[in-house]
Amino acid sequence: MMRRVAVPAEKLPSCGGRALFEFEDKSLALFNIDGRLHAIDDGCPHQGASLCGGQLQGRVIQCRAHGLRFNLETGYLLNSTAIKVGCYQVERGAIKYLSYSPDQQLINRLSSALALALVFAFASSAR
């Protein structure tokens, strides 16, 4: 089911800024890049480190914990379509997102964790 959640004006980041927005059981990182708002899950799919405080380079956020880099427009890990952070559409100060059951959220996290483990295993074996 699609839901819309209004973001209070004081939580909307100014141009070039970022903000952490929490509601219900979600924690989202909001980024304002060239006047366009981007919203992603704040937790990195690897080990849950906050992405809001990561290094921002254009439309790419780098996790501070292990350096994984995610595209803010798609949510995907750079150079991969196997690993993705939740990415949400922002319209007129409201975030649109799909409301999942807790079981579906667990399945999505496990899928990302398995894909990430395979990427690291492959990278380690290539050395």
Image (spheres, rainbow, N blue to C red):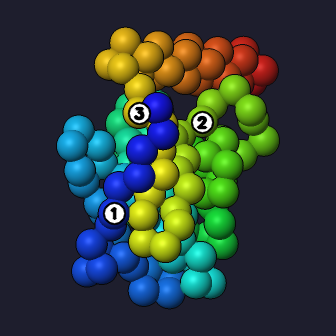
Q: Residues within 10 Å of mark 2 (few under 14, many from 20)?
A: many
User: Label 1 to label 3, Cα distance in Å?
Assistant: 15 Å
Label 1 close to label 3 by CB (< 8 Å): no
x then y, percent, for residue 126 = 78, 21
Q: Is residue 58 above or below residue 14?
A: above
Q: Is residue 105 left or right of residue 114?
A: left
Q: Residue at x 33, y 63 (%)?
A: 6
Mark 2 or 3, which is nearer the eye?
Answer: 3
Q: Is residue 88 visible?
A: yes
What secondary structure is marked by label 3?
Answer: loop
Q: Earlier in the sequence, mark 2 or mark 1?
A: 1
**In the rendered image, which quarter contains the C terminus?**
top right
Work out whether residue 72 or residue 122 is closer to the camera in this orientation and state it: 72
Work out whether residue 21 or residue 92 is closer to the camera in this orientation and state it: 92
Q: Residue at x 75, y 35 (%)?
A: 80
Q: Earlier in the sequence, mark 2 or mark 3?
A: 2
Q: Which mark is residue 84?
A: 2
x then y, percent, for residue 70 = 61, 49
Which residue is label 1 attached to?
Answer: 6
Work out whether residue 11 or residue 67 is closer to the camera in this orientation and state it: 11
Q: Residue at x 66, y 42 (%)?
A: 76
Q: Is residue 57 above or below residue 75?
A: below
Which residue is label 3 attached to?
Answer: 99
Q: Residues within 10 Å of mark 3 (few under 14, many from 20)?
A: few
